[in-house]
Amino acid sequence: MQKLSEKQRKFADYYIQSGNAAESYKKAGYKVNEATARANSSRMLTNASIIEYIKSVNETLSNCRIADMEEVKNFWSEVLRGDVNGEKVQLRDRIKASELIAKSNGAFITKIEELDSREIIITMSDELKDWGG
């Protein structure tokens, strides 16, 4: 990836925040009228280095926003203990959190067995009976 100029990086960062290319172009420090901003910002969004930078930042942001199981279990544990960010948690929510923690740890595995009750009937021809002795 080719290194971005300071203005290109600013443009990409503003674009990631707002989704408005022309406005991002102006905020990045380009002093142009609206028509030129639209045309040039559109052109910038075809630049391979800018596209790669935007994808990279979006991927990083996405990874930071998605909770992993450890974070989820930590949250459930806070709820179970009855205090989340200084807020008192109701008993029913604490019970539900304990249930979710237990389920995620395999405490309530339900095993279902189905017995096959079908009969299999094998009919042998007379030739097979004679051959078998």
Image: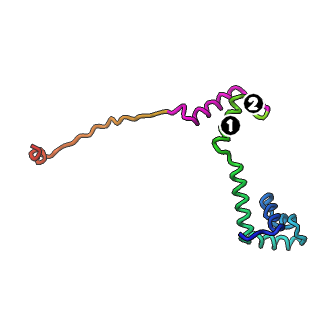
Disc on res. 74: 1
> Mark 1 or mark 2, which is nearer the start of the sequence?
1
Q: Which residues are magenta?
A: 86-109
Q: Position of residue 89 (x, y in %)?
A: 74, 29
Q: Amino acid at mark 2?
A: Asp
Residue 55 pos. (x, y %): 70, 62
- Quarter of the picture containing the C terminus is top left
Residue at numbered disc 2 = 83
Please tell me whether mark 1 sits on a helix, a strand or a loop.
helix
Count of numbered circles in the view: 2
Q: Residue at x 80, y 65 (%)?
A: 9
Element type where label 2 sits in the image? strand
> In which image quadrant can residue 73 be found?
top right
Residue pictured at 71% horizontal, 69% vertical = 1
Q: Position of residue 127 (x, y in %)?
A: 11, 48
| Residue 106 placement: quadrant | top right
The residue nearer to you, when weighing 78 against 44, is 78
- Name which residue lies at 51% across and 33% down: 109
Q: Distance from label 2 to label 1 (Cα)?
A: 12 Å
